[in-house]
Amino acid sequence: MLAAGCQQRRVLPEELRAVLDVLPRAPRRRLIGQAVSDIAGGAQALSEIAFLRLCRRHRLPTPDLQEHRVDEAGRNRWLDAYWREWRVQGEIDGAHHIDARHWAADMRRQNDVWTSGDRILRFPAWRIRARPDEIAATVRRALMVAGWTPTTPRRDRAHE
């Protein structure tokens, strides 16, 4: 609901943060605060927020969200997730992408992306929540092929 309110331009993330600031005992305050931060960072849908959480949980680089680009036909497009340094894009598709017209347009845009030299990953929104480990493994492989080197977490010697 928070993301939808911001996406529809009915409220700003800063306004949500201000309300949260005056409610120190709000139920699920931490969860709401994290969602507001994700929205302020560009997430416009619940699936994009879930994708950011997936990236954090699996120690993947944080992508830029809703990154602007102009397609081959000169139209403005917005990338759901973009790792610019490695030229990897992630698209999170809602149910409307199943419609034949959307599907054909998505394929055309995907071909434009590939022919420009970027890689593109596409995930149905429901799979982000249902199979997060699988999605994370796919993103990790794509980023590594593109040149990203994962850092290994430092072990705490006090617990060895």
Image (cartoon, rainbow, N blue to C red):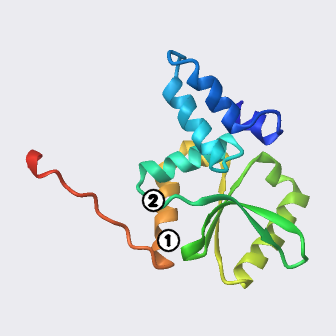
Which quadrant of the rendered structure holds the N terminus?
top right
The percent position of residue 133, horizontal first and vertical second, equals 46, 51
Query: Residue at position x 82%, y 33% from top?
Result: 10
Query: Residue at position x 77%, y 70% from top?
Result: 69
- The CA distance from mark 2 to mark 1 is 9 Å
| Amino acid type at image mark 2 | Leu
Whether 83 is drawn above or below 125: the answer is: below
Query: Residue at position x 57%, y 25% from top?
Result: 21
Q: The residue tagged with tag 2: helix, strand or loop?
A: loop
Residue 27 lies left or right of residue 151; in this view the side is right
Q: The residue tagged with tag 1: helix, strand or loop?
A: helix
| Residue 131 in view here | no
Residue 98 lies left or right of residue 50; in this view the side is right
Residue 139 lies left or right of residue 80; in this view the side is left
Whether 46 is drawn above or below 119: the answer is: above
- Name the N-terminal-most of marks 2 and 1: 2
| Amino acid type at image mark 1 | Leu
Q: Looking at the rendering, which quadrant does residue 7 occupy?
A: top right
User: Contact, CB < 8 Å: mark 2 with mark 1?
Assistant: yes
| Residue 103 in view here | yes
The percent position of residue 150, horizontal first and vertical second, equals 37, 67
The percent position of residue 136, horizontal first and vertical second, equals 48, 57
Residue nearest the observer in this picture, 116 or 110: 116
Q: Looking at the rendering, which quadrant does residue 148 occupy?
A: bottom left
The percent position of residue 160, horizontal first and vertical second, equals 8, 49
Q: Which mark is residue 36?
A: none
Q: Which mark is residue 143?
A: 1
Q: Which residue is mark 2?
A: 60
Query: Residue at position x 86%, y 58% from top?
Result: 102
